[in-house]
C-alpha cells in the first residue's frame, strides 16, 4: 500500500506479579457510582475521564492502548534530544542515532532543498519507455522501501516454518483499503476527494500546472481503482489457507509474461526457484493491466506513488499537503511536532539501536523477571481450562497443551541487537540517511532468503506499546514499552496486574488458538492437528463470536465487522477468562479482602476496563471500524465481559441490565 499512516498494531501485551514483592495500595479513581456497572461497564469505569479529557490537537485520540505511543515518543524524543546535542564516540550507536535525528530536525536545510532530493527519482520515471524499463524501475524502488505495484518480502514458509522464502502480497493502493474506492457514503466520498486533491497538490509542487495536476490525479485514482478491484477484502485476507500459494518461479513467469518474474527477481537480487504468491488474483489482474494501461499513465502513477512515499520527508509544502489529507482521514487537528515525528522516524529506521538506549534508561530486569512469572502462571491456567473443555476430545486436548507449552516467550527486548553499521548517516543529509537506512533494511530481509529462520528476531521495536503473537514461530512477544501502567505496575497488587497486563497475556496466548492460529501446529506449520469433530465444534463457537459482535454498533448505526474482528474478539473473551483463573490462584484472588473499597474481583475487572481507556476523534473511529481487526475500545471491555460470568457475580449484573446475556448464550471457547 502506498503512503498511509500505519494505523494499527494487530497485537498486544503482558504482566507479572510476585507475592514476595511489597505492594503499594493503588487508589482507584474516576468510578461513576451513579451508573449501574451492568449497563455499560466501560462508561462506569472510564466515563468521567472520557467526558473531561481533551484530545491533543496533534493527535487523533488519547488514552491507553496505541495512544500510549504518544507519551512514549516524548520519552524517545528526550533521549534523542540529549544524544544529538552530545559529542558521542565515533562509530557508536549514540552517534548514528543522534546524527540521524539531528538531520531530520534540521528543517532549514530540508526546506531549502525543496524537492531536490526526489528529482533524480522523477527523472528516472521520465526515462521509462516500455514494460521492461517500467518493471526495472519498480524493482529498484522496492529495494529502498518505495513499493508501488509489487509487494515483496521475505518470511517463513508457513508449511515449513523453519525456512525463509520469498513472499508476494497485494499492494498498490493510496487509500487505506479497497472498499474506499467503491463506497459512496458521504464520509468515504470526502476521503476520496481529499486524496485526489492531495495527489494534485503534490504534482503542482513539482511544477505541474493546476489543470494538468488535476488530470494526473484522476489518472492515478483510476489506476488505483482498477488495482483495488483485484484486491481481496480484509475479511477474505483472514483465510490463511487461501493465502498460501507457493509456486515455481518458472510457472509464475509463464502465468505473468508482462511482469516477467525471472527478470524482476533478478533485479531484486532475490535468488529463488519458488515463491509464495499470497493473493494470485491481484497479480493476474496486474499482469493484464500492465498491457492495458498506457505507459504514459503508468509513469504518472509511479510519480504520484513516489511523491506520496516521500512527502513527509521533503520541504514544508509537501509536509503540509500530506497533513491536509491525513486530517480528513483521521480528524487530527494540527500537525505533530517535528520532534515527535522524528522520534517515530528513527524508531522505524534504527529501531533496535534506539531501543537499546531506551532499555538502559527505562526498563529493569526485575520487571522482565516478574513478567515471565506471570506468563508462566497464565500458561498453567490455560492448561487447566483446556482440560475442562467439555466439547473437545482427549486426543485434541493433548495436542493443544503440547502447543501451549511449546510457546516461546519474549519479554522486554531482544537477546541480540541488530547491527546498523551499513547505514550511512550525515547530519545535513536527512533524505539520503533515510534512503540508506531503507536500503539496509531491504538487504537485511534479502539476506534471510532461503536460510533458516532466526528464532531470536523481533518484529516490533522495544519502546512500542504493543504485543503480538507470531503463529509461524509459535511465539508471544511483549516489548518493554507496554510494561508500564495501566498494564503493568511492578508494585501494584495482583488484581490490578492480572486484570491489566494479565488479560493481554491471555489475549496473546489465545491467538495461538483463535480462528487463524488454531490452524498452525506447535512448530508453527500450517498443518491440521484437530479431529474433524472437534474442529467443527470449534468453528461453531467461533461463528457465535462473529454473530454476537456484528450486533454491536458505534457512531450511530455503524456496526462492528464481526467477521473482520473475530480473531481479536475471541482472544479478548478467552484472555479475560484465563487471566481471571490465573488471578484466582494468587493469595489475593483466593480471598475477599477489600482494598480501597473494592473486592479483589472488582479490582480485577476495573483494571481490565482501564487498559482500554481511550477516546478518539469520530473520523479516526470510523477509520478504525473500517480497517482495524480489533473492536473499538469500549467493546473490548463490554463485549467480552458480557460473556464472563465472574463479572456478573462481582458487580451483581442482573436480567434487565444492558450487558446481561442469559447464561446459555454466553460464549466459551477456551
Image (cartoon, helix red, strand yellow):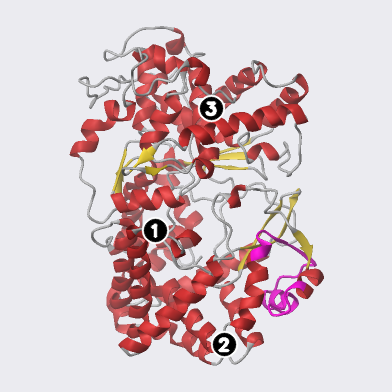
Give the mark toward the camera: 1 or 3.
3
Q: Is residue 628 magenta?
A: no
State the separation of the CA atoms marked 2 and 3: 52 Å
Is residue 328 shown to the viewer in this render? yes
Is residue 135 shown to the viewer in this render? no
Residue lying at 76% horizontally and 41% vertically, measured from the top left: 527
Mark nearer the N terminus (2 vs 3): 2
Give the labeled residue for mark 2. 295
Tell me the tag on residue 344. 1
Look at the image and give the residue range highlighted in magenta. 255-281
Report x, y in % for residue 431. Answer: 42, 76
Mark nearer the N terminus (1 vs 3): 1
Give the labeled residue for mark 3. 574
Mark nearer the N terminus (2 vs 1): 2
- The answer to whether mark 1 and mark 3 are in CB contact below 8 A is no
Q: Residue furthest left?
A: 52
Q: Is residue 515 left or right of residue 36?
A: right
Q: Is residue 111 above or below residue 661?
A: below
Amino acid at each position: 500500500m502506498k503512503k498511509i499512516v500505519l494505523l494499527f498494531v494487530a497485537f498486544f501485551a503482558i504482566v507479572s506479579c510476585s507475592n514476595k514483592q511489597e505492594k503499594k495500595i493503588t487508589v482507584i479513581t474516576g468510578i461513576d457510582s451513579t451508573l449501574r456497572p451492568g449497563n455499560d461497564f466501560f462508561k462506569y469505569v472510564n466515563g468521567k475521564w472520557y467526558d473531561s479529557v481533551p484530545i491533543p490537537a496533534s493527535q487523533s485520540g488519547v488514552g491507553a492502548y496505541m495512544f500510549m505511543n504518544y507519551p512514549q515518543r516524548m520519552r524517545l524524543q528526550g533521549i534523542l534530544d540529549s544524544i544529538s546535542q552530545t559529542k558521542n564516540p565515533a562509530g557508536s550507536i549514540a552517534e548514528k542515532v543522534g546524527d540521524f535525528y539531528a538531520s531530520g530536525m534540521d528543517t532549514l536545510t530540508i526546506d531549502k532543498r525543496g524537492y531536490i532530493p526526489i528529482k533524480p527519482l522523477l527523472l528516472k520515471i521520465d526515462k521509462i519507455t516500455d514494460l521492461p524499463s517500467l518493471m526495472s524501475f519498480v524493482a529498484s524502488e522496492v529495494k529502498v522501501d518505495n513499493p508501488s505495484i509489487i509487494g515483496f518480502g521475505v518470511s517463513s514458509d508457513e508449511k515449513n516454518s523453519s525456512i525463509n522464502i520469498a513472499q508476494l502480497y497485494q499492494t498498490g493502493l493510496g487509500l487505506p483499503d479497497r472498499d474506499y474506492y467503491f463506497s459512496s457514503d458521504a464520509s468515504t466520498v470526502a476521503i476520496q476527494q481529499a486524496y485526489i486533491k492531495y495527489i494534485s497538490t503534490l504534482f503542482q509542487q513539482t511544477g505541474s500546472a493546476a489543470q494538468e495536476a488535476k488530470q494526473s490525479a484522476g489518472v492515478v485514482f483510476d489506476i488505483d481503482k482498477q488495482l483495488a478491484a483485484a484486491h481481496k477484502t480484509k475479511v477474505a485476507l483472514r483465510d490463511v489457507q487461501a493465502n498460501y500459494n507457493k509456486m515455481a518461479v518458472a510457472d509464475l513467469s509463464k502465468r505473468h509474461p508482462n511482469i516477467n518474474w525471472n527478470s524482476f527477481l533478478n533485479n531484486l537480487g532475490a535468488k529463488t526457484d519458488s515463491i509464495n504468491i499470497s493473493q494470485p488474483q491481484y497479480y493476474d489482474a496486474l499482469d493484464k493491466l500492465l498491457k492495458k494501461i498506457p505507459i504514459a499513465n503508468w509513469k504518472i502513477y509511479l510519480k504520484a506513488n513516489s511523491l506520496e512515499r516521500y512527502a513527509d520527508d521533503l520541504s514544508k509544502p509537501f509536509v503540509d499537503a500530506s497533513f491536509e489529507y491525513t486530517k480528513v482521514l483521521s480528524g487530527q487537528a494540527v500537525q505533530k511536532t517535528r520532534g515527535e515525528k522524528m522520534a517515530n522516524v528513527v524508531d522505524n529506521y534504527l529501531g533496535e539501536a534506539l531501543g537499546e538506549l531506551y532499555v538502559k534508561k527505562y526498563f529493569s530486569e526485575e520487571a522482565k523477571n516478574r513478567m515471565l512469572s506471570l506468563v508462566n502462571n497464565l500458561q498453567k491456567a490455560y492448561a487447566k481450562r483446556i482440560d475442562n473443555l467439555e466439547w473437545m476430545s482427549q486426543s485434541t486436548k493433548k495436542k493443544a497443551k503440547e502447543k501451549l507449552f511449546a510457546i516461546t516467550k519474549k519479554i522486554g527486548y531482544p537477546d541480540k541487537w541488530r547491527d546498523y553499521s551499513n547505514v550511512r548517516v550525515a547530519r545535513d543529509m536527512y533524505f539520503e540517511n533515510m534512503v540508506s537506512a531503507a536500503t539496509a533494511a531491504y538487504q537485511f530481509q534479502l539476506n534471510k532468503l532461503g536460510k533458516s529462520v532466526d528464532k531470536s528476531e523481533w518484529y516490533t521495536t522495544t519502546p512500542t506499546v504493543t504485543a503480538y503473537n507470531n503463529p509461524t514461530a509459535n511465539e508471544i512477544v511483549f516489548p518493554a514499552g507496554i510494561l508500564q501502567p495501566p498494564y503493568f505496575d511492578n508494585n501494584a497488587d495482583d488484581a490490578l496486574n492480572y486484570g491489566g497486563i494479565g488479560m493481554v497475556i491471555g489475549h496473546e496466548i489465545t491467538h495461538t488458538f483463535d480462528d487463524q492460529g488454531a490452524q498452525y501446529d506447535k512448530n508453527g506449520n500450517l498443518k491440521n492437528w484437530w479431529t474433524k469433530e472437534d474442529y467443527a465444534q470449534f468453528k461453531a463457537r467461533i461463528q457465535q463470536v462473529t454473530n454476537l459482535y456484528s450486533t454491536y454498533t458505534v457512531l450511530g448505526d455503524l456496526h462492528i465487522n464481526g467477521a473482520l474482528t473475530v480473531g481479536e474478539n475471541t482472544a479478548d473473551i478467552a484472555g479475560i477468562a484465563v487471566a481471571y483463573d490465573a488471578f484466582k490462584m494468587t493469595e489475593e484472588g483466593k480471598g475477599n479482602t477489600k482494598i480501597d473499597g473494592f473486592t479483589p474481583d472488582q479490582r480485577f475487572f476495573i483494571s481490565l476496563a482501564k487498559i482500554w481507556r481511550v477516546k478518539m476523534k469520530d473520523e479516526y473511529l470510523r477509520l478504525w471500524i473500517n480497517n482495524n481487526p480489533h473492536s473499538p475500545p469500549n467493546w473490548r471491555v463490554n463485549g467480552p465481559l458480557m460473556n464472563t460470568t465472574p463479572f456478573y457475580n462481582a458487580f451483581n449484573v442482573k436480567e434487565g441490565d444492558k450487558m446481561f446475556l442469559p447464561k446459555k448464550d454466553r460464549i466459551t471457547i477456551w
